[in-house]
Image (cartoon, rainbow, N blue to C red):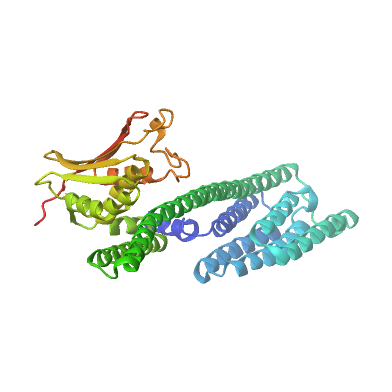
Amino acid sequence: MFFWKKMGNMFFGGELELRIRLFNVLACIGLVASLSSIIFGLVTSAGLIDLLLNSILVILSVSILWYAAVSKNYQRCYVITIIVIFIIMFPLAFINLGSYTSGMPMFFVFAVLFTVFMLTGKKMFALVSIELVLYTSLFFYAYFYPEKVNSISEESMLVGDNIVAFLVVSVGLSIAVAAHIRLFDKQNRELETARKQAEEYAKMKGELFAEMSHEMRTPLTVMSAYAQFAVEQIRVNGVSEQTLADLSNISEEARRLAEMADGTLKILLSSSETAQADEWEAMLVDIGDLASRLTRLLNPVAQRKGKNLTAFIEDGVPKIQGDSDELIQLLWNITQNAITHAHGNIEMAVVRADDAAITVTLKDDGDGIDPEILPRIFEWGVSGGEGRSGIGLSICRDIARKHGGDISVQSEPGSGTCVSVTLKRKTEDFDE
């Protein structure tokens, strides 16, 4: 049992190329056909030439099979098979074993198709041309010089020979065609899969660059605003503490912008699994501290626009496990939206929702969101204002859900908007 399993893997193992397995199958079929012909010849008392030619075909089939498996030089084996068996042995068998009254013409068809299956390019064209010319010439030769060929006189032997040829050629060609159809279907499926993957990649790339553009625009806007503040302060008062604070804010935002670019590069150069693993390092993040820093950073920007940003941070708000950069981006997006749409006041609150969650709310006194847009406000590209990209809230929802929470929006026309973000507390015990 082990021997036959080993032979099966050697000649028909799945790691072999389809064309190699097909060659081995057809060679085995030829071997079986030759052995069947020998047995049939012995039963029917066929001539010595019949037995000799079929014996030679058996030896050649076994030798080529073994040489191909050992040398792995399959192209050479294909050519040897075509020249020795199809171009030399088949014509000899045709002349000595019944000419066109026997089953040999069916083997000629088998030989031509085998050559087409096994070879490619100029080599295939040349050998097929030789076969077609040779086999056609043999028909004419047998017709015009019948005394030069051996015909099968007994009808029973003629029927038996044709039955063997019919079965061997039919089985061999059926296997070859079925294998090629299967390969064609497999390639079509692989191409379709590759096409879908390419489309998905193109979509992801577009979303990535849209998100990158959106995320980088925010710190650039703040940097620009604080740079303008610093210029005005230096022009009026020279370098003051406020000027230094503004320049420090510019430096901090420049650093964050560089980190964004570095993170984007990591995503582009690594697999999604690696990128995801990099994002989720064990880190405790103080949301209250992030909210306080963000308020101090953005309130001067809001005041320049005639608006006021305040924050209430509940005492004892616990830290959560997460990605600080992403959480900063979440808070930044919803705060920037509130500043953009508010008429005068923006209120932020960070409170403990329960023992397992923290809630961050942003309220503004703006015009609110159109009721037709509100149900779709988290969809990619949907915006509640003119000239907006419509991806900020979608990004916020993704970040909130990655941190075990979610985000919701309540808004009434003319009554402002309230954005609520729920974030889960740390999911593991860490030393604070």
Left or right of residue 104: residue 81: left
Residue at 85%, 56% (x, y): give it.
Answer: 142
Nearer to me, 227 or 373: 227
Residue at 35%, 68% (x, y): give it.
Answer: 235
Nearer to me, 319 or 374: 374
Please indicate, yes or no, whether residue 260 appears anywhere in the rendered image.
Answer: no
Is 98 above or below relative to 363? below
Left or right of residue 139: residue 254: left
Nearer to me, 172 or 283: 283
The total number of labels drawn is 0
Residue 284 position within the rendered picture, expressed as x and y whole percent measured from the top left: 17, 54
Image quadrant holding the N terminus, namely bottom left
Left or right of residue 422: residue 232: right
Is 287 above or below relative to 148? above
Residue 364 occupies which quadrant of the picture? top left
Residue 72 position within the rendered picture, expressed as x and y whole percent measured from the top left: 53, 69
Residue 130 position within the rendered picture, expressed as x and y whole percent measured from the top left: 78, 63
Residue 308 position within the rendered picture, expressed as x and y whole percent measured from the top left: 27, 45
- Of all residues, the one furthest to the right in this rendering is 144
Is 94 above or below relative to 374? below
Image quadrant holding the C terminus, namely bottom left
Residue at 38%, 63% (x, y): give it.
Answer: 261
- Of all residues, the one furthest to the front in this rendering is 236
Nearer to me, 121 or 273: 273
Please indicate, yes or no, whether residue 26 appears anywhere in the rendered image.
Answer: yes
